[in-house]
Image (cartoon, rainbow, N blue to C red):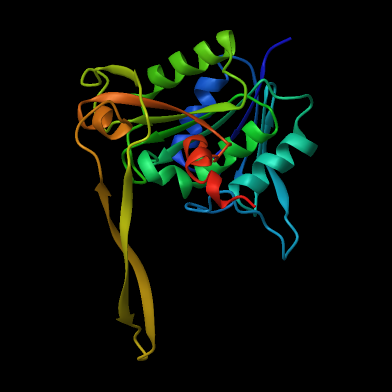
Amino acid sequence: MKPLILITNDDGYAARGLKVLTEVAREFGDVVVMAPEQNASAKGLSLTTKVPVRVREVQQEKGLHVYACDGTPVDCLKLAYEHFCPRRPNLVLSGINHGSNSSINVLYSGTMGAVIEATVLGVNAIGFSLLNHSLEADFEPSRPIVRHIVGHVLKHGLPADVALNVNIPRLTADEIKGIRLCHQASGKWLDSFEKRVDPIGRPYWWLTGKFVCNEPPDTSDEWALMHGYVSVVPIHTDYTHYPAIGELKNMEL
């Protein structure tokens, strides 16, 4: 039996990156796609709890079912897993995201939120992102990268409770130097809500910001991307900082 691959994203079911990811996935097996009706970026692990979630079929053919969902990326993943997959998926893919999910971005990303949820469900999962926010971004150089990593994970699997956060630099296929296993760079967004006024005089605020990397050049994902490599960061759901348990032991009663 062919592998079953479940795909989602946070840019919406019509996004160019999702189309490329789906085309590559079909080289390996049967595919179920469920993605948001509209852009759902920066939703992280959020779920829809106050209103019903609705799903509509977009496309059906041999080996491919595509659905659009009006919920979050995690809603899409959970609904597809529970009700729309004909059997347990062998692999979950999310992306290809328009824009970076390296460093601290992984905490906010809807793309990676779905990947983390898949890991909670015990399914191998990979999130792919391209460092290009444009709606017209060229995803063709991403194809061989996705093909290589998906093939490797389907063949060899992943460690228990571990998923992959893959970021691809905005380069041509010839310019990409290779793939590097990395750690997540220490960085943060210096957010700023810019106050503006609408045409009828009412104030509103628009989120802007600047990313700041807090560590020198090393083997982090930010370093790899700046030097022309695809970064692959193994992530997991256990947020425990184990060294701190000993340091904070005197807190116990």
Instruction: Name the foreground residue: 194 vs 11.
Output: 194
**Is 105 above or below relative to 121?**
below
6 left or right of 166? right
Front residue of 206 and 24: 206
In the rendered image, residue 151, in percent from the top left (x then y), is placed at: 52, 12
Residue drawn 36% across the image and 25% down it: 182
Image quarter in which the N terminus is found: top right
Residue closest to the eye, 19 or 186: 186
- Left or right, residue 57 beside residue 177: right
Residue positioned 61% across, 51% down in the render: 72
| Visible residue check, residue 172 | yes
Total numbered labels placed on residues in the image: 0
Residue lying at 72% horizontally and 55% vertically, measured from the top left: 53
Instruction: Report whether 11 appears left or right of 207.
Output: right
* Identity of the residue drawn at 75% across and 30% down: 85
Residue 153: give x, y in percent of width and height. Answer: 54, 15
